[in-house]
Image: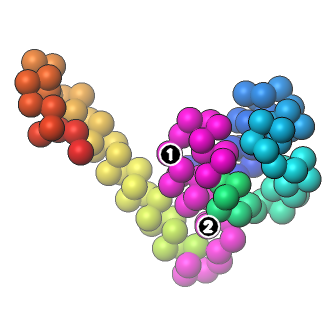
Amino acid sequence: MKDLIQYVDDLKKKYGSDNKAAKELNIERTTIANIRKRGQMGEETAVKIADALGIDQGEVLIAAAMARSEGAVKNAWENISKRAGLAASIATLAIAGMPFYELIQQPSMYIM
């Protein structure tokens, strides 16, 4: 899982600068500067970043929660992140391993 700075770097790459990214997300430029400085962000910003990058909101929300946490709580978030990643990997492999014909004949059986 990426850290928050990496997500902000992805935004910068997509929009060309932190200023343009902030404008596109309708957030203050100082919000992005504070994320870079403190390595933390709120949930609303995490959702906006995920949407702008076209990725799962939960991924960025978990990264934001991990950045704010310490000790056992941080470990719990890390375990949740790993389980979520493992579940997604298993689902992808299961679907990729299915014969295409079977998948299109009974898609509801494989896609939840």
Name which residue type carries label 1.
Asp
Q: Give the color scheme: rainbow, by chain, secondary structure or one colour.
A: rainbow
| Magenta span | 47-73
Location of mark 2 (residue): 65
Q: Is 23 colored magenta in this rendering?
A: no
Nearer-N-terminus badge (1/2): 1
- Relative to 105, is 34 on the left or the right? right
Q: Viewer-proximal residue, 85 or 102? A: 102
Q: Extreme top residue here?
A: 101
The relative height of residue 18 versus residue 101 in the rendered view (above or below) is below
Residue at the spot 89% in from the left edge and 37% down from the top edge: 19
Identify the image quadrant of residue 95: top left
Residue at the spot 61% in from the left edge and 52% down from the top edge: 47
Image x and y of residue 87, in percent: 32, 51
Image x and y of residue 79, in percent: 45, 66
Q: Extreme bottom residue here?
A: 72
Image x and y of residue 70, in percent: 65, 77
Q: Extreme front residue here?
A: 26
- Given contact means CB atoms under 8 Å apart, are the residues at marks 1 and 2 in contact? no
Location of mark 1 (residue): 56
Q: Could you tell me how far apart the alpha carbons at marks 1 and 2 are, in whole angstroms?
A: 15 Å
Q: Is 53 colored magenta in this rendering?
A: yes
Q: Residues within 10 Å of mark 2 (few under 14, many from 20)?
A: some
- Relative to 94, is 62 on the left or the right? right
Q: Quadrant of the C terminus?
A: top left
Q: Viewer-proximal residue, 110 or 82? A: 110
